[in-house]
Image (tube, rainbow, N blue to C red):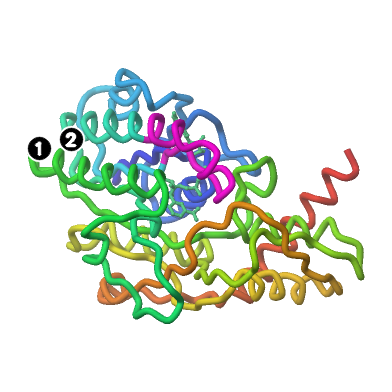
Amino acid sequence: MKRVLVCGAGGFIGSHLVKRLKAEGAWVRGADLKVPEFSPSPADDFRLLDLREEANCRAAVEIPGGGSFDEVFQLAADMGGMGFIQAAECEIMRNSALINIHMSQAAARRGVRRYFFSSSACVYRDMTAEEPELSESDAYPALPDNEYGWEKLYAERLAMAFGRRHGMAVRLARFQNCYGPEGTWRGGREKAPAALCRKVAEAEDGGTIEVWGDGKATRAFTYIDDLVDGIILLMASSLENGVNIGRREYVSVDELARTIVAVSGKSVRLEHVSGPVGVKARNFRNDRISSIGWTSKFSLRDGLARTYPWIAAQVEAARRT
Ligand code: NAD
């Protein structure tokens, strides 16, 4: 049986990944500061560990009786939406870098065979919506828009360096914005799709919601099941260096909000207010991940039709307590 460690198994993508790995028959250990918030983890072993500590990273990759994990998926990060990324740049640079430094080294020294690192589309520079899509090599010369992107770029290189030194195969995914049920939907770390779903769910029929910025920035959004498909395929592949995973369906922030309103069945107006917005556009190619058979199965509308009811139910449950 394949033995797999998922770091960040208490988070949104990590908890969905653990479910998929278990369904595929792996023995899974999860490691995180916290257990998943919304449903119990099916991991065979779940360790509550602060992975900024070197000793905890060594403990996470330790298997009683010897041997090493076949695969480590490193998704733990101090992470949030644009509001958090702009407000917590020191925490992101420090905490996520420490996690990656210690986990890359612990996994490589322990003889882990394959190591997956969750990087981000934030490694790319700002661009305009009319520009051709960026391919993976366009990450250099590097000019990420925020410190979160710089830390990801550093962590990519760190994982590759430890991989070269210790013969560990490293797979680097650059995720587009991901959304779906059981993701953070309130508290300041939520990303735009979840924040807008929450605002629409909280709004009266005929009411108004606030949208940060002028609503014109363009983005692409990837539904969680599509992303997990990409993670599994990439880890099993021979693709080295950064690999984009994201659906190429570009919408403005206003179009995202209007799609959520349509899915909700309500009539809700948008009011633009100043707030952290991020880059103007982020469009990237997905030829590399497509070359190993990945396709996106969920349109934005299909994915939101699965996500909005879950967030609306959370809003309703919170209202009752
Ligand atoms: P998340 O915040 O839900 O999950 C991250 C997990 O890391 C959390 O459960 C958190 O508790 C854990 N963590 C943070 N600090 C830790 C520490 N010191 N020790 C142990 N665990 C710690 O975020 P997510 O959306 O599931 O993202 C997973 C990964 O994918 C992250 O690396 C993120 O940067 C990357 N990513 C996500 C997106 C997205 O749209 N969600 C886009 C690009 C990249």
Disc 1: which residue: 166
**Left or right of residue 227: residue 123:** left
Alpha carbon separation for disc pair 1 and 2: 6 Å
Q: Residue at x 36, y 47 (%)?
A: 26
Front residue (pair 227, 250): 250
The secondary element bearing badge 1 is classed as helix
Quarter of the image where one finds residue 206:
bottom right
Q: Range of the magenta residues?
A: 76-96
* Amino acid bearing label 1: His
- Circle 1/circle 2 CB separation < 8 Å: yes
> Are there few (<14), some (14-19), or many (20+) residues within 10 Å of tag 2?
many
Residue drawn 49% across the image and 67% down it: 280
Task: State whether residue 50 is above or below residue 225.
Answer: above
User: Would you say the magenta stretch is mainly helix, strand or loop?
Assistant: helix
The extreme top residue here reads 55
Q: Nearer the viewer, residue 7 or 44?
A: 7
Mark 2 residue type: Ala
